[in-house]
Image (cartoon, rainbow, N blue to C red):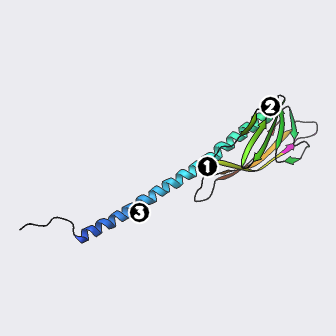
Amino acid sequence: MKKNSGFTLVELLIYIGLLTIFMSIVTRIFTGIIDVQLSSEATGSVEEDGRFIYSRMAYDVSRATSVITPSDLGSQTNSLIILIGGVTNTYRVSGDNLVLDNNFGTNQLNGMGTHISNLSFQRLGNVNGQYSIQMKFTITSTTQQINGPDTKNIETTIAIK
């Protein structure tokens, strides 16, 4: 007498049940990894662009020979116009980007992964003393996350030498 080889219906149901449980666990792990990657990418973009913009502004403002806008002590504007070595440099928001306009063209200062908003500059100091510029802006990641975009408010004061 020959025995039939194969799977019984109960064995197939057990196999399908175990496969379903395994696939749901793997899917949860995979989506968790993707969420962590997106969060890390968003935070990294915001931090990197924030550091770059701060460094660039500190370098440029410290080299400025004069500040054209904001013109008066205590006045606040949404653009900064400074003179560096005879070249007029204008910092402003265009769309969602921080741009620098000068004789050499227009350059975007933030990366493609971030947006800039709430940009403001205020001239500080005293009448006979050294001037400084207070800069404020909000930088937001463009990476879509479950918890929403990563956002950071930056406020700093840079002295004019």
Reading the image, the residue beneath label 3 is 24
Q: Secondary structure at mark 1?
A: helix
Q: Bounds of the magenta span?
A: 122-128
| Residue drawn at (39%, 61%) of the image | 23
x then y, percent, for residue 39: 57, 52
Q: Nearer the viewer, residue 130 or 138?
A: 138
Q: Are marks 2 and 1 in contact (CB under 8 Å)?
A: no
Q: Quadrant of the C terminus?
A: top right
Q: Secondary structure at mark 3?
A: helix
Q: Quadrant of residue 158?
A: top right
Closer to the chain start, of discs 3 and 1, is 3
For label 1, count other residues whose C-alpha is less than 10 Å away and answer few (under 14), some (14-19) or many (20+): some
x then y, percent, for residue 86: 84, 29
8 displayed left or right of 33 = left
* Amino acid residing under circle 3: Ser
Which residue ends up furthest to the top in the rendered image? 85
Would residue 154 be seen by someone viewing this image from the given angle?
yes
Reading the image, the residue beneath label 1 is 43
Closer to the chain start, of discs 2 and 1, is 1
How far separated are the C-alphas under marks 2 and 1?
30 Å
